[in-house]
Amino acid sequence: MLVARHQSKVRGYLRQLARDPAAADDMAQDAFIRAWDKLETYSGQGRFLSWLMAIAHKQFLQAVRKDKQVRRLEQALEHQAASSDMSEQSPVADGGDLADLSRLLAALSEDERTAMVLAYGYGLSHGEINEITGVPLGTVKSHIHRGKERIRKRFALENPGHA
């Protein structure tokens, strides 16, 4: 029942972080197994989804540490995003599809991408992001602010009322 209820959110989050659907699905499966093994540690404080996302986030971090190929891929994507033609049309103007989202997220650091995905993709509060990632609250806010600014500058987007 827990898998059925939360699977799409956990898999979606990990897919956005890992940018490799197969690896993300493996991480999600490992996260649910770990959550099942640790279910008795859930205290009932806070949202269950936040607790589960924290486990998924830790699975992601472990996978990144173990797999140097993921790091090389991220560096290649960041290099590609930095060297692409700045005169391209804004990805948002193209209809905002999934490929455009990937381009926007590729322009961010791992910390910024994580905070932005949790805040805007899953509607989690800064406090919940702090709980999931273990990053201090002020740093979470900074990652989100810097991430928004980096996207605005990189893709020449206007600042629509501090969105």
Image (cartoon, rainbow, N blue to C red):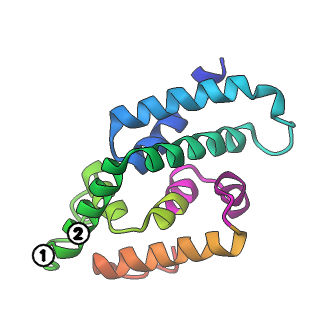
Q: Residue 15: x percent and y percent?
A: 41, 42
Q: Are marks 1 and 2 in contact (CB under 8 Å)?
A: no
Residue 18 in magenta stretch: no
Q: Is residue 138 above or below residue 29?
A: below
Residue under circle 1?
Answer: 85
- Mark closer to the observer (1, 2): 2
**In the figure, 42 relative to 63: above or below?**
above
Q: Is residue 3 left or right of residue 156?
A: right
Residue 116 left/right relative to 2: left
Viewer-closest of 50 and 98: 50
Where residue 32 appears, as percent x and y from the top left, is: 60, 27
Q: Measured from the top left, where is residue 113 in percent x and y?
A: 46, 61
Q: Residue at label 2?
A: 79
- The mark total stands at 2
Q: Disc 2 residue type?
A: His
Residue range corresponding to the magenta coloring: 116-135
Q: Quadrant of the N terminus?
A: top right
